[in-house]
Image: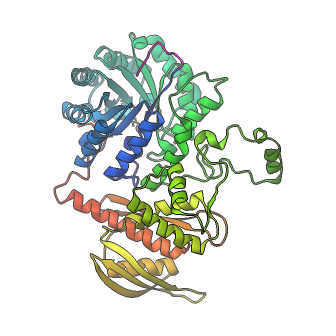
């Protein structure tokens, strides 16, 4: 996989399932993780960081399964700088054709204070843990966390130790998104010049986007000699997120004239995976997000449209098809059949079994009765609708009628099925959504706190579907629910109930002695 003689090849290391998934509220289910890993492998990602195996039984199971299923990608797991973490990581990744252990420790003054190690003690720890990892696995990545705020002399010293102990990739994280492009490049250049053995290994760059510079910092590092970029789909990640895979890959493709580097990514798969990650993580993509935002290829102003009709290159630096976006978004209507639906969903990245297709087809017809034109985005919203896999859910919305108007309070009449038994209530509230949520709470009392309530119109027009995301938190567990409907209040009720169902599943899985409130990767024990 890693040909160190191919100087123009940049390896893409995707950490959507580890750094991305660790972002509060972005938790994915086991099956969702396997699906995303499959899509990453298929699109040509070189290394998939599949999780943090010691964090929980769930993480361990997901990393092991992804390792077994991977076809071409290297499968990597994260481990803190101790033998227990590293052994657990190896147990999970060892099933892969190409396994990798990624071990790390915070090296900046602030991070050194956490395990209370002085510089020499930390250097010893790095030597021992990287040696241990290398005795288990040929492919070892080491990261000095918060490298961009680590003293340069000390950084050179510990990088040299890690290389001597057998690390094959050295990753330089900008953990808090603090660096800027010139500094990012200078740091990589300095390490390459000063550290003995640097030409034997691959340098990676791992940037966070707190100042909006993650992509620029990653590209600057590549120009200085880094040959692995760590990133996530849609830039998913804690706080302002990580470097966005699609931005780095498309920048290298579109501006190959000034950045003559190649990746192995099939860019036509970008749009599908972006949609899937947005769906399963519950983090919608901002409309004007570079590459994958809804408006990234939309030309609304008269001048732009005129130019585009004459020559698309007037305002477009890449074609929608380059990222797998169909030129026209208008897809289907009332008379479209099952085969057409299956084929369109396949184009959008959804391969359905016959029984699933039947279910979606019924919903598609119901939607087509209410909405004349069905666009690609409508189909994606339909697939995101949580009630699609609601059969096994403990809570299900059966009926909802709201009364709203200029006079408060508004009221909601709701029938909720709870463990198969229908229960009914009428509740009031400050607006129809509040009344509906109050009705759910009356029928199913809970302590979960609403953290986020978000509504998006899927397409234009007053008959547009609304997709609603609801994020709930209870005792440190976070779950996001989503639903779509042409009626915003119905979508809200379903999204709220979906979030509760996900919390219930999580609570059941974790049990009283669970390790759910798992170790934080920011602490080194
Ligand atoms: O941002 C960071 O420092 C990390 C490390 C664990 C590599 O994600
Ligand atoms: Zn990170």
Q: Quadrant of residue 1?
A: top left
Judge left or right: residue 411 versus residue 330.
left
Q: Nearer the viewer, residue 54 or 147?
A: 54
Q: How is the image coloured?
A: rainbow
Question: Is residue 4 one of those drawn in magenta?
Answer: yes
Q: Relative to 306, does residue 438 appear above or below in the rendering?
A: below
Label count reads 0
Tell me which residue sits at (53%, 34%) in the image.
266
**Secondary structure character of the magenta stretch overall:** loop
Ligand number 2: quarter of image: top left
Judge left or right: residue 180 versus residue 97.
right
Judge left or right: residue 258 versus residue 188.
right
Residue 362 appearing in the image: yes
Q: Nearer the viewer, residue 155 or 362?
A: 362
Tell me which residue sits at (39%, 67%) in the image.
498
Q: Nearer the viewer, residue 360 or 8?
A: 360
Residue 211 appearing in the image: no
**Residue range (magenta):** 1-8
Q: Residue 283: where, in percent of width, then height?
A: 48, 54
Q: Residue 514: where, in percent of width, then height?
A: 19, 54
In the orientation shown, which residue stands out farthest toward the left? Answer: 513
**Which corner quadrant holds the C terminus?**
top left
Q: Relative to 470, does residue 27 appear above or below in the rendering?
A: above
Q: Quadrant of residue 69?
A: top left
Q: Residue 288: where, in percent of width, then height?
A: 63, 50
Tell me which residue sits at (20%, 32%) in the image.
87
Q: Residue 482: where, in percent of width, then height?
A: 45, 63
């Amino acid at each position: 996989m890693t040909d160190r003689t191919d100087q123009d090849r940049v390896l893409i290391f995707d950490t959507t399932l580890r750094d991305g998934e660790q972002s509060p509220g972005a938790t994915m289910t086991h099956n969702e993780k396997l699906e995303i890993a499959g899509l990453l492998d298929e699109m040509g990602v070189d290394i998939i960081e599949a999780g943090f195996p010691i964090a929980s039984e769930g993480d361990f199971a997901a990393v092991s399964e992804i390792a077994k299923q991977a076809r071409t990608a290297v499968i990597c797991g994260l481990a803190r700088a101790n033998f227990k973490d590293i052994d657990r990581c190896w147990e999970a990744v060892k099933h892969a054709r190409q396994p990798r252990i990624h071990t790390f420790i915070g090296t900046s003054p602030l991070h050194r204070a956490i395990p209370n190690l002085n510089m020499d003690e930390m250097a010893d720890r790095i030597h021992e843990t990287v040696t241990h990892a290398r005795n288990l696995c040929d492919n070892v990545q080491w990261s000095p966390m918060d490298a961009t705020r680590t003293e340069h002399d000390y950084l050179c010293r510990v990088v040299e130790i890690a290389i001597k102990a057998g690390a094959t990739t050295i990753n330089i994280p900008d953990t808090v998104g603090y660096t800027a492009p010139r500094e990012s490049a200078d740091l990589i250049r300095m390490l390459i010049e000063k550290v003995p053995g640097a030409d034997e290994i691959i340098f990676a760059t791992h940037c966070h986007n707190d100042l909006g510079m993650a992509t620029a910092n990653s590209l600057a590092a590549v120009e200085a000699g880094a040959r692995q970029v760590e990133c996530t789909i849609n830039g998913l990640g804690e706080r302002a997120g990580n470097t966005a895979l699609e931005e780095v890959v498309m920048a290298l493709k579109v501006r190959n004239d000034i950045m003559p580097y190649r990746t192995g990514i099939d860019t036509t798969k970008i749009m599908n995976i972006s949609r899937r990650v947005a769906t399963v993580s519950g983090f919608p993509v901002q409309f004007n997000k570079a590459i994958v935002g809804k408006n990234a290829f939309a030309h609304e102003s008269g001048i732009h449209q005129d130019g585009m009709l004459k020559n698309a290159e007037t305002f477009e630096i890449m074609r929608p098809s380059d990222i797998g976006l169909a030129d026209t978004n208008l897809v289907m209507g009332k008379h479209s059949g099952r085969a057409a639906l299956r084929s369109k969903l396949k184009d959008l990245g959804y391969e359905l079994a016959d029984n699933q297709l039947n279910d979606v087809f019924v919903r598609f017809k119901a939607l087509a009765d209410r909405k004349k034109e069905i666009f690609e985005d409508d189909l994606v919203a339909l697939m995101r609708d949580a009630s699609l896999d609601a059969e096994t859910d403990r809570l299900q919305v059966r009926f909802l009628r709201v009364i709203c108007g200029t006079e408060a309070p508004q009221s909601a009449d709701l029938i909720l099925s709870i463990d198969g038994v229908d229960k009914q209530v009428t509740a009031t509230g400050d607006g129809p959504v509040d009344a509906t949520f109050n009705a759910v709470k009356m029928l199913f009392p809970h302590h979960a706190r609403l953290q986020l309530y978000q509504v998006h119109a899927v397409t234009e027009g007053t008959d547009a579907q609304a997709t609603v995301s609801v994020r709930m938190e209870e005792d440190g567990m976070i779950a996001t629910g989503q639903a779509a409907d042409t009626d915003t209040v119905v979508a809200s009720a379903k999204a709220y109930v979906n979030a509760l169902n996900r919390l219930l599943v999580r609570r059941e899985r974790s049990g009283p002695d669970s390790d759910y409130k798992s170790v934080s990767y920011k602490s080194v024990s």
